[in-house]
Image (tube, rainbow, N blue to C red):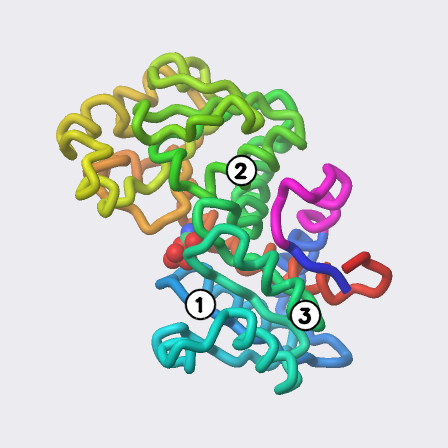
Amino acid sequence: MRNLLAIRYLDAAEITAILDSARQYRAAVRERKSTVVDSPLGVGLLFFEDSTRTRVSFEQAAAHLGHRTVNFSGSSSSMRKGETLRDTIQTLRYEGLDAVVVRHPAAGSCNLAAHEFGGPVINAGDGAHEHPTQALGDALTILDRKGTIEGLRVAIIGDVLHSRVARSNAWLLSKLGAEVWLCGPRTLMPTNASRLPGKVTNEMPEAVDGADVVMCLRLQRERMASGLVGSVGEYTRHYQVNRRTLRRCSPDAIVMHPGPMNRGVEIDDATADGPASVIADQVRNSVYVRMAALSWCFAEGGAA
Ligand code: CP
């Protein structure tokens, strides 16, 4: 058994193995072959933050594999009465869950959960740290369209500072040989951005020039309230992905967004719904990579 806490901890061979497994699950599900495992297990879905895509796709993935899921949200748990995350995770362990999928606003919370829980822990997004299964689904989507990740130029645009999606994708795509560009306003770039795997710029044209893949990040509206962005109009003028952006990219560039989207802010409607968009495929593929992630975590022989 093993944890899936961060792409940073995986090597290229492990990433490729999970993606190969996801492809096999996709083929089996589409051909209506059984993907149910011999020994179904109990998987806790612990979401301390809102989610549509991640929570539902983990539930779908577990159902395809025949696992039982137990849903748990912070707002209806005894954490509202002051129970700590550590005690909560231990309680779930004593109650006999076999694995937990955790989303939490604090970076590092999934590492704490892995330390306290007796079985595999999968990070479903922890603060501004990582969102490994999102990056795996994104990689599968890129591979479907481009056939390879090696040598691609990928521009990740927007609120890099607060984005776990940007971090997991930067690690994954770099490990598989892409040239990654991280781009956003100065106030929304981490001070240590140069320590992330990728080139850093505040100039959108520099990031997207000849890009094969443009990945938009959600502008977290709460950041505007804290003064990190002057106005939506100013942000949109410099960093929105739209038809003008695509003119600078490779002619067959694809556009990605992890969702949820702020339409008209980081991406315009014509691009989100246009021929270059692979956003629907990102969502479809997320179910298969989460099946692969659950199986990888439950596999015999992995180091915890
Ligand atoms: N991409 C993503 O994590 O979406 P949700 O917040 O809806 O799960």
Q: Quadrant of residue 287?
A: bottom right
Is 17 or 79 nearer to us in this picture?
79
Q: Which residue is mark 2?
A: 169
Task: Determine whether 9 is above or below 26 in the image.
Answer: above
Of badges 1 and 3, nearer the viewer stands 1
Would you say residue 6 sits in the magenta stretch?
yes
Is 261 or 273 nearer to us in this picture?
261
- Looking at the rendering, the stretch of residues picked out in magenta corresponds to 5-20
At label 2, which amino acid type do we have?
Asn
Give the x, y percent position of residue 116.
65, 69
- Secondary structure under tag 1 reads strand
- Residue 95 visible to the viewer: yes
Is 275 or 149 nearer to us in this picture?
149
Q: Residue at x 53, y 38 (%)?
A: 169
Report the disc number at residue 264. none
Q: Residue at x 74, y 48 (%)?
A: 17
- Residue 30 visible to the viewer: no
Q: Residue at x 36, y 38 (%)?
A: 217
